Image (cartoon, rainbow, N blue to C red):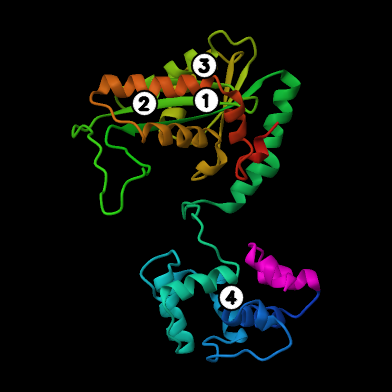
Amino acid sequence: MAAVKRVESGESPEFVAAGLGINRRTIYRWIEAFHYGGEGALKAKPIRGAPPKLEAKQMAKLARIVRTKNPLQLNFEFALWTLAMIRVLIGREFAVSLSEVSVGRLMRRLGFPPQRPLYRAWQQDPALVERWRAEAYPKIAARAKREGALIFFADESGIRSDHHAGTTWSPVGQTPVVKATGARYGLNMLSAVNAPGHFRFMTVEGRVNASVFRDFLKRLITGMERKIFLIVDGHPAHKAKLVSRFVEDNAEAIELFFLPPYAPELNPDELAWGHIKTRIAKTTVQTKEELKAMLNRVMRRLQKMPEIVAGFFHAPTCAYARE
């Protein structure tokens, strides 16, 4: 009963079995008994009612398939496991028909709650990402400490007038309607964050090119008493000759470093944009001026909450840069 309770609370059956020193087939038998008969079925008495549709061995095989296989490898249409696809998989592998509700209960008891996936570019080189975490960034951090420099991470993003998200409460059968503009316009934004919680930003009408990025660098170093080590991605604007010349001319104030290709998850500033867009998405604006004013308000508010900005460096993918 204790083992099943641990699985019910979210632990992996395999992990619980290893911790208790029992065969993994045993815990799947216990999960099977509990799934079909409740706690009473775990006691030393026979399970009444219809026989289980999936046996312990079948549950273990199902868990192994979902854990190790991408749906595309099994000729499904999508790359994410859905209850409908798992239901088809169960029918295909075990000739057993279950409702999607039953499949959902079963998957939770096998240690598979629904989760929002993380997306990674297929072009990303895991070796380069690991080298950045283990070697490249520690060298930058050590050098910044020796030279008294500040490490910032910078990024660009955009927001559109038709970007909306979020939910609201409403009576059943009455979908609420929010009046918003039908016009489409947007703004681009640049920002930089560091582990102590500093947040610097700039909004732009039009695309971010080398000239715009150079202007952002000018603003970033203005008033700074310490040199800035700025970490950015490989966007063409960041490597343009115009920018390189500016950095060379201001070598005592700023130096650029580049993240591995296709690895935005390493940049804490990506989380800043997620935070900002979440708040903008719940508002409605009528004009580009209103959008810009709203965006500036949200970013100035974030600027006054260094604990939130510092929290971006506690995310699992960015903790390597935490001071």
Q: Are marks 1 and 2 in contact (CB under 8 Å)?
A: no
Instruction: Name which of mark 4 and mark 3 comes first in the sequence.
Output: 4
Q: Are marks 3 and 1 in contact (CB under 8 Å)?
A: yes
Q: Nearer the viewer, mark 1 or mark 4?
A: 4
Residue holding disc 3:
220
* Residue farthest right in this picture: 21
The kind of residue on which mark 4 rests is Arg
Residue holding disc 4:
64
Q: Residue at x 63, y 9 (%)?
A: 225
Disc number for residue 192: 1
Magenta stretch containing residue 130, yes or no? Answer: no
Q: Is residue 317 above or below residue 34?
A: above
* Residue farthest left in this picture: 182
Disc number for residue 209: 2
Instruction: Name which of mark 3 and mark 1 comes first in the sequence.
Output: 1
The residues tagged by marks 3 and 1 sit, at their Cα atoms, a distance apart of 8 Å
Give the secondary structure at mark 2.
loop
